[in-house]
Image: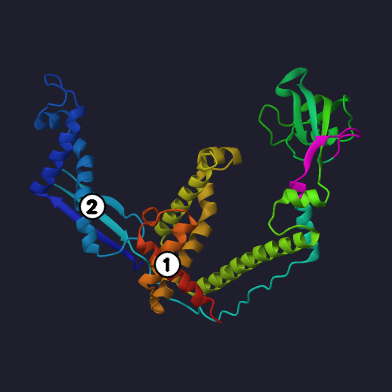
Amino acid sequence: MKNVKEVEIEVKGKEWESFLDKAYTKKKKDIKVDGFRKGSVPKDIFIKKVGIEALFMDACDEVIQSKYKDALDEANVELVCEPNVSIEHVDAKSCKVKFTFISKPEVKLGEYKKLGIKRDKVKVTDEEIEHQIEHIREHMAEVVIKENGSVSEGNTAVIDFEGVVDGKKLDGGSGANYPLEIGSHTFIPGFEEGLVGMKVNETKELNLTFPEDYVQDLKGKKVTFTVTVREIKERVKPEINEDFFEDLGIEGVKDLETLKNHVKDELTQQKEHEAEEKYLDELLHKATDNMTVDINNEIIDTEVDRMMKQYEQELSMQGVTLQQYLSLTGGKIEDFKTMLKPQAIARIKTRYLLEEIIKVENITVTKESIKEEIKKVSEQYNMKEEEFLSAIGGEEMVEYDLKMKAALEVIKQG
């Protein structure tokens, strides 16, 4: 591919000898030879004892580190991913290494204006408003003791239970005063359904079967649970009255009419945002489909790795490692990377599209607009401007972001 540049560098003679000496100095610290203190064996004795070949890999590493900048200068490219380095030849007389550098591929824009895509019109219905108000009431519902009646869907049954498999008490299969929400699917299929209709202090045997995708020792096995309901709780939604509006604590909302207006405004904003996101996605998808670019696998792999790190950071904020997440979901790291690949390609194409539009349209931003953006965003995140710039990588990143936004506006034309 045109954006791949290979540079071979060979070192030999005294220069190669100097790299072998460096490797020997590093290696001898860990070598013990009879008659010499550890780390003090002479080079000729070292070579006679373990062979000069033992120095080759460390010496080649020294060559790679020493010659990397020379190779990059010779290639004269702006890297977009880590270069590949291979050892082409090594012996006692010389070493040849090959650096493979990958720069941004050539991008040929297709049509990126007047793409014929319309933004969806936003409408909020009365039914959606009523549904949202019911959702608010549900969120504010109180959990109270169900004085009469039996367990029903949505109730929380406080239970004692004990499981028996093959005539023996199930390890970890018992509990006392355990609160179980009916419909949460916390227990195996049939358990929660079996509690529906039970009353307080009623005891019942549930004869169930562990599913085939359960743990190895139990999957497909018969199990009997003896269950006693100790208490039943239900969620009671608040009445729509003066107390309800006071508890809401929303400024300007004092009655049902003002609540409906408030909910309508919020739903409208949400739908406007979703419509804008959908509109941009469709525009970018069509514009990237119209352009031509060959993306190296190495660039895709780099983007996948970047996305993996972002995902790991998000999981860590929830106190979960990526390995724990994969264990819980039964996934493998390679399958996870394969799943991310289409999204990575789309990200790369979008980035290259917008960068090329910036170049073709000669998009620039003023120093004043950069300063305004820094002030606005740093205040938004409640940070000092210096802290904000340090976190994102400097003014250049703010300028880049503003240019990318301007390129998006170009695509939206027509």
Q: Image quadrant of residue 355?
A: bottom left
Q: Secondary structure at mark 1?
A: helix
**Which residue, given by chain and number where applicable, does mark 2 sit on?**
97
Q: Amino acid at mark 1?
A: Glu
Residue 242, horizontal then vertical, whole percent: 80, 51
Front-lying residue, 162 or 392 = 392
Residue drawn at x 91%, y 34% is 149
Q: Which amino acid type corresponds to the residue marked 2 in the rendered image? A: Val
Looking at the rendering, in which quadrant would you find the C terminus?
bottom right
Quadrant location of residue 354?
bottom left
Instruction: Name the quadrant of the N terminus.
Output: bottom left
Q: Which residue is more in the foreground, 233 or 214? A: 233
Q: Nearer the viewer, mark 2 or mark 1?
A: 1
Residue 43 rendering spot, x and y as whole percentages: 11, 32
Which sits earlier in the primary sequence, circle 2 or circle 1? Answer: 2
**Circle 2 — which element?**
strand
Q: In the rendering, at what x and y percent does residue 400 appear?
A: 40, 66
Please tell me the numbered disc located at residue 372. 1
Magenta residues, start to end: 137-152
Q: Is residue 59 above or below residue 278?
A: above
Q: Residue furthest top?
A: 168
